């Protein structure tokens, strides 16, 4: 791969992302080494910024990440950490910022993930349905008052974050499901969907404690 | 100008879309095993159909039924699907989301149609509260029986039983709100409440958790004593995490917030 496409800003154009960031959108922060299963945050504290750059892969890694572009992102994670003591003494982050190249080359999708926008985080649920549900309650409660103050969020349905044992497939899923993580992002309403009336896809979990569509 | 109008009329008459596709070509795309072909057909049908609106909408509803089939979901590399940071087939789900919204709009316009309800209720893989689950909750006259059955039996799988419990809770909250147009009789709403309270003793962890959480959606002061007891003393735990205590604490908090909030009811 030529160097031109290994520049993080150029990747956004090359992979046809819906975000076209300026240099000022990036923060210098070391990438979490590829293959790291999770970075653990002590609950009741604030998030360690160096645990949010997941732009390292087998292809390249960047020591730059989009972290502060969405002003709701860091306060949202911190709000969860303040409430997550009941989940255990630590909360695992399995992904946050990802560069478009990583998103497209490693996942085979398009570069419109909120991870590419730098306002999504995946929280470890250890292939355990009960832990996913307990963490969902913690996240919803943590963000309920926060959401009414201008920080809307979306949560990926559990079925999307699910571990499939061998010999099963998404077309023939096992029951019960085994979720590896809970994805929450702070996509602003109207930024992605068409028609742009709300942020979350029809199947995604909406904020609680707010007027609903 | 006259010539252009005449050409447009002729193309419409023989069933050609504004994109130059005939209905025969679109029908072939609708039957394709490749979801990208089906997505193209959907966008033509939704925006510039070469047939009447009624025919286009019937095809869109049938397309949702196609996407509801497990065989329609795109295959994903198992190594990718099992990663701890994989977020599902976003591009496919964006298409399905647009398709769902179209069928929901058709159902809102023509609620007497039976095909739209079957297609929508057969949809799987949604969370709650979501746009889809809240929409179901607002149409209790058409959906309550379906979710009652799913919540009671679990025949459609444990995951869907849990979702059904949550949708019923949203339905009760909607029906109880003084600000909404109700679709169910009060006796029906009472039946929904009984159905949610009964799995409190379920041996399936997820089902009981959803039932406890659902109480937070519509429960009253009378439920607080039980929820507070679960939150303080329930003994079930895995890896030191007391699941029922967590959800009971938040359910009780939701009820207390609701009963102390200033009401807008007249």
Image: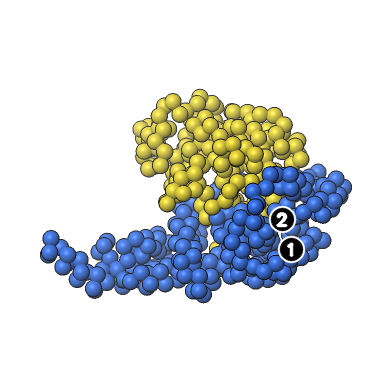
Chain colours: A yellow, B blue
In this rendering, the answer to whether A34 lies above or below B174 is: above
Q: Which residue is mark 2?
A: B218
Q: Can residue B40 be seen in this snapshot?
A: no
Check disc 1 and report its element: helix, strand or loop: helix
* B238 relative position to B181: left or right: right
Return the x and y of residue B91 as percentages of the image width and height.
45, 52
Residue at the far front: name it: B266
Which residue is located at x 65 percent, y 71 percent? Answer: B145
Q: Chain of mark 1?
A: B
Judge by depth and name the residue closer to the eye, B121 or A181. B121
Which residue is located at x 46 percent, y 62 percent? Answer: B105
Question: Pointers 1 and 2 in contact (CB under 8 A)?
Answer: yes
Q: Which residue is mark 1?
A: B193
Return the x and y of residue A136 as percentages of the image width and height.
67, 47
Point out the tag, 1 or 2, that comes first from the N-terminus. 1
Return the x and y of residue B195 as percentages of the image width and height.
74, 66
* B134 relative position to A98: left or right: right
Judge by depth and name the residue closer to the eye, A203 or B73. A203
In the rendered image, which quarter contains the N terminus of chain A?
Answer: top left
Q: Can residue A202 be seen in this snapshot?
A: yes
* B233 relative position to A84: left or right: right
Q: Residues within 10 Å of mark 2 (few under 14, many from 20)?
A: many
Q: Residues within 10 Å of mark 1 (few under 14, many from 20)?
A: many
Judge by depth and name the residue closer to the eye, B220 or A135. B220
In this rendering, the answer to whether B233 lies above or below B46 is: above
Which residue is located at x 66 percent, y 54 percent? Answer: A178
């Amino acid at each position: 791969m030529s160097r031109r496409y290994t520049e993080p800003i150029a990747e956004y154009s090359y992979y046809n992302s819906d975000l076209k960031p300026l240099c000022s959108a990036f923060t210098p922060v070391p990438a979490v080494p590829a293959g790291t299963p999770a970075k653990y945050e002590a609950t009741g504290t604030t998030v360690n910024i160096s645990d949010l750059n997941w732009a390292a892969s087998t292809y390249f890694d960047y020591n730059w990440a989009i972290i502060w572009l969405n002003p709701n992102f860091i306060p949202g994670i911190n709000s969860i950490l303040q409430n997550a003591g009941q989940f255990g003494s630590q909360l695992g982050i399995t992904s946050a910022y990802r560069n478009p190249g990583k998103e497209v080359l490693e996942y085979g999708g398009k570069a419109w993930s909120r991870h590419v926008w730098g306002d999504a985080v995946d929280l470890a649920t250890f292939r355990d349905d009960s832990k996913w549900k307990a963490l969902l309650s913690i996240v919803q409660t943590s963000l309920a008052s926060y959401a009414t103050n201008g920080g809307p969020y979306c949560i990926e349905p559990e079925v999307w974050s699910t571990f499939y044992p061998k010999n099963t497939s998404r077309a023939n899923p096992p029951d019960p499901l085994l979720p590896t993580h809970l994805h929450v992002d702070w996509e602003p309403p109207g930024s992605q969907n068409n028609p742009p009336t709300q942020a979350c896809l029809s199947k995604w979990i909406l904020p609680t404690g707010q007027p609903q569509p | 100008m006259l010539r252009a109008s005449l050409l447009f009329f002729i193309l419409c008459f023989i069933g050609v879309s504004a994109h130059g596709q005939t209905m025969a070509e679109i029908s072939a795309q609708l039957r394709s095993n490749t979801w990208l072909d089906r997505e193209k057909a959907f966008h033509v049908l939704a925006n510039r159909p070469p047939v009447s609106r009624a025919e286009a909408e019937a095809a869109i509803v049938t397309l949702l039924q196609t996407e509801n089939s497990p065989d329609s979901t795109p295959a994903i590399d198992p190594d990718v699907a099992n990663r701890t940071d994989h977020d599902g087939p976003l591009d496919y789900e964006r298409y399905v989301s647009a398709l769902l919204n179209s069928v929901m709009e058709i159902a809102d316009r023509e609620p007497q149609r039976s095909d739209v309800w079957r297609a929508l209720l057969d949809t799987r893989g949604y969370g709650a509260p979501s746009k889809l689950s809240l929409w179901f909750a607002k149409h209790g006259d058409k959906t309550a029986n379906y979710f009652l059955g799913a919540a009671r039996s679990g025949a459609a799988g444990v995951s869907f039983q849990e979702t059904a419990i949550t949708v019923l809770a949203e339905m009760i909250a909607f029906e109880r709100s003084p600000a909404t147009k109700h679709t169910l009789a009060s006796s029906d709403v009472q039946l929904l409440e009984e159905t949610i309270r009964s799995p409190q003793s379920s041996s399936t962890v997820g089902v009981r958790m959803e039932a406890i959480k659902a109480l937070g959606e519509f429960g009253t002061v009378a439920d607080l004593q039980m929820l507070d007891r679960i939150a303080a003393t329930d003994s079930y735990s895995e890896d030191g995490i007391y699941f029922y205590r967590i959800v009971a604490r938040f359910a009780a908090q939701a009820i207390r917030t609701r009963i102390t909030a200033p009401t807008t009811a007249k």
